[in-house]
Image (cartoon, rainbow, N blue to C red):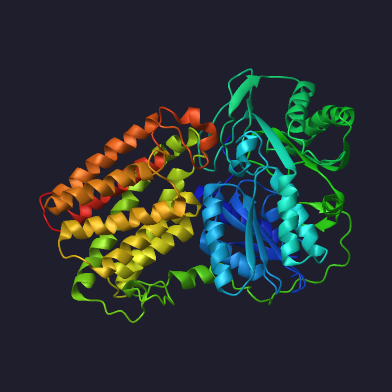
């Protein structure tokens, strides 16, 4: 069944627009997400949650007193951009600082970490923590690698309650960390979910089986087991979670029985009827259990069970009142009227529009002596002449990724969430438009690339978005320095800078089954060809062949990073979508920068 939508590309924008209209007395929209319509006291620590869409009521449905102060909203199953994190964080912040919280996913970790750093540079106390409750995604020896799934609800709720209680910045951080340490979740799927605009679900569960250990981004489980009754499923879930009971845990537990989107309340009630006596038999006392849809995965058929072992503080925060559009507990007291002219209430798109304004190789306000970052930089003749080449190249990249969108999504859906093609298309669309705008304003090639990199990161979001944004920005920086005049060597230097930026930010190495597996051989081959004196066209062709070979070879690898890692075996036999898209982009650059029969860039 296809999700209801007008334009699948605008699904999230349209959903948030409808949501904010419905709950205008409780939330208001800001660039990148939503914040409370009635701001909390400025002395209160702000808790900002977020991640991709498709999980309602997580994340924007839980903004309100006793819970979150704001939510950063990414595209479906895609991390928000760094710019979105900064926008929402700054809008929600008072005087006591901001605590950012997400699940443990590579794109979220990169963008929220960069957002944290930028908020700190603005003078806002900020910390960022991830939730790691999914017992299926890594062993007890690698808890730091576990995903955050329905345990998000527990950790977010505890942090919001601690903040509402008047806890200090450090105390709210400690509360969130403590809740995460004592929270465990296991999920199962009966059928996959379908992205807006897609004809088929991201995965299917074979007849007569249940997917065990599913995440919340449309990825299949880590294994399968025979279909079972509610009582049999309850026994499996409870037994697995009890096996990780903290050594010092008491008998009182918070419980979340969570529907993933298509498993509805009556079914969950049946399952709860089987779970409750198992908890009783284990000597556990369920404290204010939540049964319903808390952290969904679009229309996935499935559910998860979460236990958080409570102590005195955690129980107080778990039981504390909350009043949000999608989640309510107790009474939070009188609620003031919405404030429409609070600080940071710019109309949606204002900050993004400001950020998109081109400047000569801008990273506005750069103070490190970077020629590419100086607003006073003079556009020389070569830089000006190369601007149309950059615009044409990015237009070709966009065209190539448009054609590849479906195939890249198919590759990504094997062990991931299937959004790579759509994310790359969003990024390249924004980058091509930003470069064209910069060129039309009279800026040079370096400025075009800088603006393109920023636009790619801001509009694509996710892991690939932030990585391509960083890579393109680093290429611009290298080209601005103009350390060499030989065109082959200059190209090699710029490419190496871009790849180095991707590696530094993402942490991937060759063999991890990421875009680096194609990017590193490409950069190395280009450097070797340039050192051997090959002309630009020949050097690029040599490097492109190395990238193609390496991208195909990723089919034999098992992912060691990112969302596909828990499903490593499933990905064997399928090349990495990031490596494939890198190679396609390199080929697109070849066709415009060094066309057939030409020997100069």
Specify whether residue 347 is in view.
yes
Specify whether residue 433 is in view.
no
Count of numbered circles on the image: 0
Q: Where is 40 relative to 376, above or below?
A: above
Left or right of 581 in this view: 145 = right
List the single residue furthest toward the front: 247
Q: Position of residue 118 (x, y in %)?
A: 54, 68
Q: Position of residue 166 (x, y in %)?
A: 81, 67
Q: Where is 245 relative to 335, above or below?
A: above
Q: Position of residue 220 (x, y in %)?
A: 57, 31
| Residue displayed at 41% across by 71% down | 363
**Residue 390 falls in image quadrant:** bottom left
Q: Position of residue 143 (x, y in %)?
A: 63, 41
Left or right of 364 in this view: 529 = left
Left or right of 269 in this view: 54 = left
| Residue displayed at 61% across by 42% down | 147
- Which residue occupies the foreground of this view, 500 or 461? 500
Left or right of 9 in this view: 181 = right
């Amino acid at each position: 069944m296809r999700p209801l939508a007008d334009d699948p590309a605008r699904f999230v924008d349209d959903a948030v627009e409808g949501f904010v209209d419905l709950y205008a007395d409780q939330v208001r929209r800001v660039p990148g997400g939503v914040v409370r319509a009635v701001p909390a006291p400025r002395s209160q620590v702000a808790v900002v949650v977020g991640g991709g869409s498709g999980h309602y009521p997580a994340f924007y449905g839980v903004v309100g007193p006793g819970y979150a102060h704001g939510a950063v909203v990414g595209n479906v199953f895609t991390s928000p951009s760094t710019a979105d994190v900064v926008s929402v964080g700054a809008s929600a912040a008072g005087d006591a600082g901001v605590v950012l919280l997400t699940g443990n996913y590579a794109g979220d970790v990169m963008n929220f970490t960069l957002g944290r750093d930028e908020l700190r540079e603005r003078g806002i106390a900020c910390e960022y923590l991830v939730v790691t409750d999914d017992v299926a995604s890594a062993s007890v020896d690698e808890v730091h690698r576990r995903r955050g799934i329905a345990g998000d609800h527990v950790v977010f709720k505890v942090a919001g309650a601690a903040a509402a209680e008047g806890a200090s910045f450090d105390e709210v951080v400690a509360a969130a960390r403590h809740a995460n340490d004592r929270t465990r979740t296991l999920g199962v799927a009966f059928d996959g979910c379908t992205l807006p605009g897609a004809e088929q679900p991201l995965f299917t569960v074979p007849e007569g089986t249940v997917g065990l250990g599913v995440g919340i981004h449309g990825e299949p489980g880590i294994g399968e087991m025979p279909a079972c009754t509610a009582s049999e499923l309850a026994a499996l879930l409870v037994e697995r979670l009890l096996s990780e009971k903290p050594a010092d845990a008491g008998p009182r537990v918070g419980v979340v029985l969570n529907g993933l989107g298509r498993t509805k309340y009556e079914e969950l009630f049946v399952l709860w009827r089987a779970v409750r006596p198992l908890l009783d038999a284990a000597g556990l006392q369920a404290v204010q259990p939540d049964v319903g849809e808390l952290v969904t995965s679009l229309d996935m058929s499935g559910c998860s069970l979460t236990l958080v072992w409570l102590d005195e503080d955690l129980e107080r925060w778990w039981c504390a009142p909350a009043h949000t559009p999608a989640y309510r507990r107790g009474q939070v007291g009188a609620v003031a009227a919405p404030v429409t002219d609070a600080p940071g209430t710019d109309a949606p798109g204002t900050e993004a529009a400001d950020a998109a304004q081109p400047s000569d190789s801008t990273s506005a306000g750069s103070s490190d002596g970077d020629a590419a970052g100086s607003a006073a930089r003079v556009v020389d003749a070569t830089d000006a002449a190369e601007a149309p080449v950059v615009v044409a190249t990015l237009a070709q990249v966009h065209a190539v990724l448009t054609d590849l969108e479906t195939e890249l999504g198919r590759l990504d859906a094997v062990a991931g969430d299937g959004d790579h093609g759509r994310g790359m298309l969003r990024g390249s669309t924004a980058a091509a438009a930003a470069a064209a705008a910069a060129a039309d304003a009279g800026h040079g090639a370096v400025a075009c690339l800088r603006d393109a990199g920023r636009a790619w990161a801001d509009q694509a979001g996710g892991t690939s978005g932030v990585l391509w944004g960083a890579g393109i920005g680093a290429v611009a920086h290298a080209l601005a320095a103009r350390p060499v005049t030989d065109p082959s060597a200059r190209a090699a230097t710029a490419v190496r800078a871009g790849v180095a930026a991707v590696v530094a930010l993402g942490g991937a190495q060759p063999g991890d089954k990421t875009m680096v597996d194609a990017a590193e051989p490409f950069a190395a081959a280009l450097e070797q060809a340039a050192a051997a004196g090959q002309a630009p066209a020949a050097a690029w062709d040599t490097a492109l062949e190395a990238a193609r070979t390496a991208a195909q070879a990723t089919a034999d690898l098992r992912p060691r990073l990112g969302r596909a890692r828990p499903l490593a075996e499933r990905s064997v036999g399928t090349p990495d979508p990031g490596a494939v898209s890198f190679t396609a982009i390199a080929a697109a650059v070849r066709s415009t920068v060094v066309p057939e029969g030409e020997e100069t860039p």
